[in-house]
Image (cartoon, helix red, strand yellow):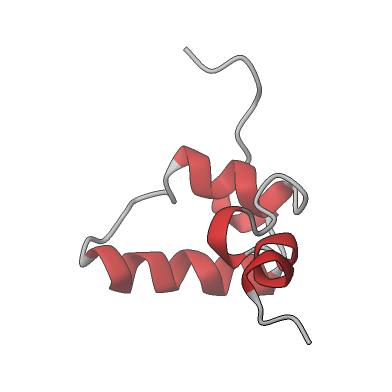
């Protein structure tokens, strides 16, 4: 059971709704509503921020040093 209210896809800005459409294409599945984790990450931009090997810190760490 969710502990927070997940917003309807229609409550998100147009840019986020476009990302939801891209998810449908990526997964080759027509979701009635975007997956819950996609909606959480779209609402809180900091939550879905780059991390791991694609983060700025990781790129600095693995870039050649002069």
> Residue at (44%, 51%) from the top-left corner?
34
Q: Nearer the viewer, residue 38 or 51?
A: 51
Give the quadrant of residue 24.
Answer: bottom left
Q: Residue furthest front?
A: 66
In the rendered view, does 5 fall on the left or right side of 66? left
Q: Nearer the viewer, residue 6 or 45?
A: 45
Q: Nearer the viewer, residue 15 or 10?
A: 15
Q: Residue furthest bottom?
A: 66
In the rendered view, does 35 fall on the left or right side of 17? left
Q: In the rendering, at what x and y percent does residue 20 appear?
A: 48, 64
Q: In the rendering, at what x and y percent does residue 54 appear?
A: 58, 66
Please tell me whether residue 44 is drawn above or below residue 30 in the rendered image.
above
> Residue at (51%, 49%) from the top-left corner?
38
Q: In the rendering, at what x and y percent does residue 64 appear?
A: 66, 82
> Residue at (65%, 59%) from the top-left corner?
50
Give the quadrant of residue 29.
Answer: bottom left
Number of dots carrying numbers:
0
In the rendered view, does 49 fall on the left or right side of 27? right
Give the quadrant of residue 27.
Answer: bottom left
Please tell me whether residue 36 is drawn above or below residue 14 in the rendered image.
above
Q: In the rendering, at what x and y percent does residue 55 appear?
A: 67, 63
Please tell me whether residue 63 is drawn above or below residue 40 in the rendered image.
below
Quadrant containing the C terminus is: bottom right
């Amino acid at each position: 059971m969710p502990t927070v209210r997940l917003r309807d896809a229609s409550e998100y800005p147009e840019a986020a709704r476009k990302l939801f459409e891209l998810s449908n294409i990526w997964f080759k599945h027509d979701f009635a509503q975007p997956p819950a984790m996609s909606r959480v990450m779209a609402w809180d931009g900091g939550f879905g921020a780059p991390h791991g090997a694609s983060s700025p810190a990781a790129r600095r760490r693995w870039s050649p040093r002069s």
